[in-house]
Amino acid sequence: MIAYFRTVFTAAWALLQGMAITLKYLFKPSITIHYPTEKLVPYEKFRGALLFDAETCISCNLCVKACPSACIQLENATNPQTKKKIAKVDWYSIDFGKCNFCRLCEEVCPTKPKAVWHSLDYEVVFYTRDEMVRCWKAGINYIGKYWNRKEKIFKDPEGQISIQEVHSRR
C-alpha cells in the first residue's frame, strides 16, 4: 500500500515540476522568428554564398590556385591596342555545385576590401544546374549572372533572396 502512494506522490510531484517550468516560460517574451516574413541575420563568421566584385579584383589568380575543389575560373583582361594582359579581370566564375565553402579563396585575396568574400546569405536558390555556375564581368552586380544554354544568353538568377542590401565584407 505504501508503494502505491509513493508512486502516486512521485508522479504528482513530477507533474507539478513540469507545470512550474511551463508557467515560468509562459510569461517570458517569445524568441521565435516568424519565417519567411522575418529573417535571422547569421553570425559574422557564417559562410554563405560567395560574392565577387569585378571592380576590386586585380586578377592575381591566387583564389584559383588556393581553391581545393577547382570551382573558380577567371580570365585576365587584355589591352585592345597592345594585346597585353592588364591587372583587371575580364570574367570570373564560381561553380557552387563544386564549392565546399572552405573560405580559402577569401583568405588569400590580397585586395582591400576583398574582391571575393562570403556573404551572410543562406537562401541561395538554384533551379537548374546552369544556375549553379555564376559568372561576373565588370558592371554585373554582386550576385552574378548565369549562362543559359538554351537561350545562349547571360541571365539574372530568379528567386534570389538577399538577407542584406549591402553585403558585408570581412
Image: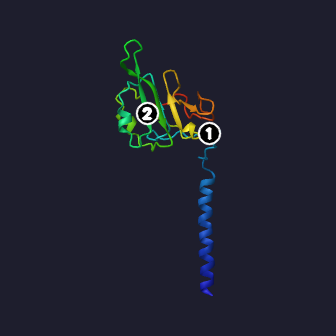
Q: Position of residue 141 (x, y in %)?
A: 53, 25
Question: Where is mark 2, residue-wise?
Answer: 73
Q: Secondary structure at mark 1?
A: loop
Kind of residue sitting beneath label 1: Glu
- Residue at horizontal 35 percent and vertical 34 percent from the top: 108
Closer to the camera, 12 or 134? 134
Q: Position of residue 13 (x, y in %)?
A: 60, 71
Q: Quick one: label 2, few (<14), some, or many (20+) residues within 10 Å?
A: some
Q: Position of residue 34 (x, y in %)?
A: 64, 43
- Image quadrant where one finds the N terminus: bottom right
Kind of residue sitting beneath label 2: Gln
Q: Is residue 155 visible?
A: no
Q: Secondary structure at mark 2?
A: strand
* Residue 31 vertical placement versus 158 (above, below): below
Question: Where is mark 1, residue-wise?
Answer: 38
Q: Earlier in the sequence, mark 2 or mark 1?
A: 1
* Residue 89 vertical placement versus 44 (above, below): above
- Image quadrant where one finds the C terminus: top left
| Residue farthest along the bottom direction in this orientation | 1
Q: Label 2 vs label 1: CA separation?
A: 36 Å
Closer to the camera, 71 or 163? 71
* Residue 99 vertical placement versus 112 (above, below): below
Question: How many numbered marks appear?
Answer: 2
- Residue at horizontal 59 percent and vertical 60 percent from the top: 21
| Residue farthest along the top direction in this orientation | 81
Q: Position of residue 10 (x, y in %)?
A: 59, 75
Q: Is residue 74 visible?
A: yes
Which image quadrant is residue 159 in?
top right
Which image quadrant is residue 68 in?
top left
- The label shown at residue 51 is none
Q: Quick one: label 1, few (<14), some, or many (20+) residues within 10 Å?
A: few
